[in-house]
Amino acid sequence: MSTNLEIKDLTVRLYPKKYAGRYINVIDSVDLYVNGGEIAAVVGESGSGKSFLGLSIMRLNPPNVSEVVSGFVKIRCPAEKEALDIIRLNPKNLPSVRGRLVSIVFQDPNTSLNPVIKIGEQITEAIFAHKKISKPEAKEIAISYLNRMNIDGKARFNAYPHELSGGMRQRVMIAMAMVLNPCFLIADEPTTALDVTTSLQVLSLIEKIKLESNLGIIFITHDLSIAKNISDKIYVFYAGQVMESGKTEEIMDNPLHPYTISLINSVPSLAADYMPKQKLFTIPGYLTRDDFAEGKCRFYARCFKRDENCLKNIPLNGINGERFVRCVKWKKK
């Protein structure tokens, strides 16, 4: 069986307590596809639904205030005889999938790691949850994965999180996510809390793991420069919807959606000949709850191309091959 993760027409609804009786489709009609050995970057502003997508794939979104309205998340992995739909999986069976078939690395290792438990014990806990092996065997596996993350496994196995640097803690999180050799990894802004040099080390490590393990990766980030350098394809998110998707080179060299164009124009360039006190380009306004409303393009309020044709639900239009754009005016430059 080929290795891939397919998301089709996924819609997840959130019921905020302060909006009694009302809801927000925080993930709306999302399609996403990633093969083994491939990195798909999900980019967009804070609040666009990127991290919630990652939680939804793992079925970690809070069930008391959210529900999946439609769609599926299918995983095809050599470890399984047939495709597995996580959305329709019995909740009792979810622990057997998390970590083994698909795993996640959260953006802040400081809050993700238990500060009073040694890192070795935290890694072996994941192993014991899926395998019936002895403690020495589990310890050996944990040490080997720490070594793969460029951490001295024997020296650091009994260390507490506070005894490690931020970059080392994030690499521990990656080791914990990879220790069961999953087919897919969700990396939720894994470099957010790191300095530039450490970020490069983590990104290089992720690419190395992808090549060694034929790992399919969904890389969530708000940094277009990182997405450009690490990903094979890009999904541009805004207000819970995919605005544009395609191969990384096509998206970066020829953006079609006004939001993608605005995002790229917002990135400062060292090559640009800026005049003294010249303002950098910014997208007017900000993401609000009203942008999630149905019946119009969700980027309408901030778009420089908007007109009356945008005041309706806009489908995701196929352009060619893997290229899609959710805009009625994409042909007009």
Image (cartoon, grey):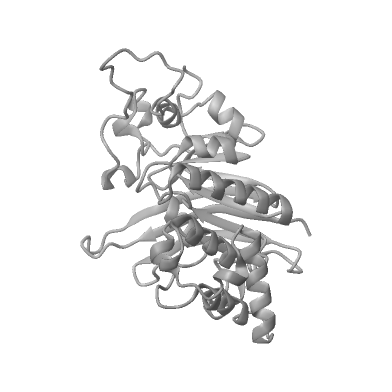
Look at 62% across and 46% down and name the residue there: 39
Left or right of 287, for residue 226: right
Q: Residue 31, position in %: x, y?
A: 55, 48
Is residue 13 in view? yes
Q: Report the label total.
A: 0
Q: Residue 37, position in %: x, y?
A: 70, 49
Q: Residue 200, position in %: x, y?
A: 53, 43
Left or right of 201, for residue 47: left
- Find residue 116 and report its image quarter: bottom left
Is residue 93 in view? no
Left or right of 133, for residue 297: left
Q: Nearer the viewer, residue 195 or 253?
A: 195
Q: Residue 291, position in %: x, y?
A: 31, 42
Q: Quadrant of the N terminus?
A: bottom right
Look at 58% across and 54% down and name the residue there: 7
Tell me if residue 133 comes above or below residue 333 in the rendering: below
